[in-house]
Image (cartoon, rainbow, N blue to C red):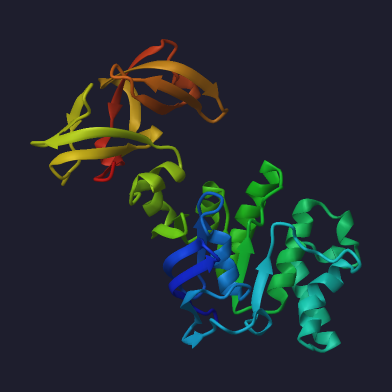
Amino acid sequence: MAERVTLNDITKRFDETLAVDDISLRVEPGETVGLVGPSGCGKTTTLRTVAGFETPSEGEVLFDDEVVTNVPPEQRNVGLVFQSYALFDNMTVQENVEFGLRMRDVPKAERADRATEMLELLDIGGMGDRDPTTLSGGQQQRVGLARALAIEPRVLLLDEPMTGLDAKLKTRLQEEIGSLLEEIDVTSMYVTHDQAEAMVMCDRIAVMNDGRVEQVGTPAEIYERPANSFVADFVGTSNRLTATVENGTLDLGHAAVEAPTGAPEGDVTVVARPEAFTLNGGPVEATIEERFYLGEHVRATARTPDDRELTLRFDPERAPESREVTLSLDTDRVHLLRDP
């Protein structure tokens, strides 16, 4: 049975450095929650606090209704998957997967059966006798995950597990491991600096900055309705434009469009993703300064008459040949913020 993880008012200080600042977060049973943010924002410290490797300066950690704040790591039954894989090169793949079970005094036959089951589940069933150093990065990552899952953990913690893998392999493993986590029904926390990876792998995402959680939501909520400018800029590509809403009109300065339904009157920041703009002779004028062919789409950087930069995205077959373009802005696809 998957367990709930609750962080209540967690603060962690290292001498004078405030690493985690009053975080409260709940991960529901069977859910995968991603912790994303720039380097040094506190996401790994938060994960280590859940694992028991760090004791919070303030606050408490609960697994279901059990307070585990001061329970040592070896007694929390947490599965860990690291960026470095941390496999033992003096053991076979099978022995690596059995290691946690052996430390728990699981009988030899039972741990062999469970390790074999995990290797089969991760599609590396024929590699039990191999030296882990002879495996590819993707195969090593599967072994690390198999070892973490073999102990039937209360909680699975993954810290930058895809770093160092090539792009094609990373994409495949994101899909496969994401499906696996859903299938086995284990509560998981997933640390990554790659927001696109988090959007594929996670049910919800917690965006962190300077030790605090800026927003928690589904990938769609984070992308379409960012809580503030930091989230809008960190997750995906955004165009932020200052504007004024008055009498149902959104005045961008260089152009005016119909305001979104329910838009508040006054000064706002418009968060417009590249796909909110379309080429069709609308009121927004721009000059394309750079364009980059990326196969599935063309990304362009453009500038408005009042010197504001836009990032645009076009279908390669419909990309404009001229530098001067006119654009429509779909205000049903923008989000308005009150913060600067």
Residue 120 screen position, x and y as percent? 76, 68
Q: Residue at x 25, y 37 (%)?
A: 331
Does the rendering let one see residue 121?
no
Quadrant of the frame with the N terminus: bottom right
Number of marks in picture: 0
Quadrant of the frame with the C terminus: top left
Q: Is residue 70 left or right of residue 211?
A: right
Residue 221 screen position, x and y as percent? 37, 53
Q: Is residue 110 left or right of residue 29?
A: right
Residue 207 in which image quadrant: bottom left
Q: Which residue occupies the foreground of this view, 115 or 163?
A: 163
Q: Which residue occupies the foreground of this view, 227 or 98?
A: 227
Q: Residue at x 33, y 24 (%)?
A: 308
Q: Residue at x 55, y 23 (%)?
A: 293
| Residue that sits furthest to the front in the current view | 16
Residue 286 in which image quadrant: top left
| Residue that sits furthest to the left in the current view | 247
Q: Is residue 225 above or below residue 5?
A: above
Q: Is residue 261 above or below residue 256?
A: below
Does the rendering let one see residue 49?
yes
Q: Is residue 149 left or right of residue 259?
A: right
Residue 163 screen position, x and y as percent? 67, 50
Residue 61 screen position, x and y as percent? 50, 78
Q: Which residue occupies the foreground of this view, 71 or 135?
A: 71
Q: Is residue 339 left or right of residue 149?
A: left
Q: Residue at x 79, y 62 (%)?
A: 124
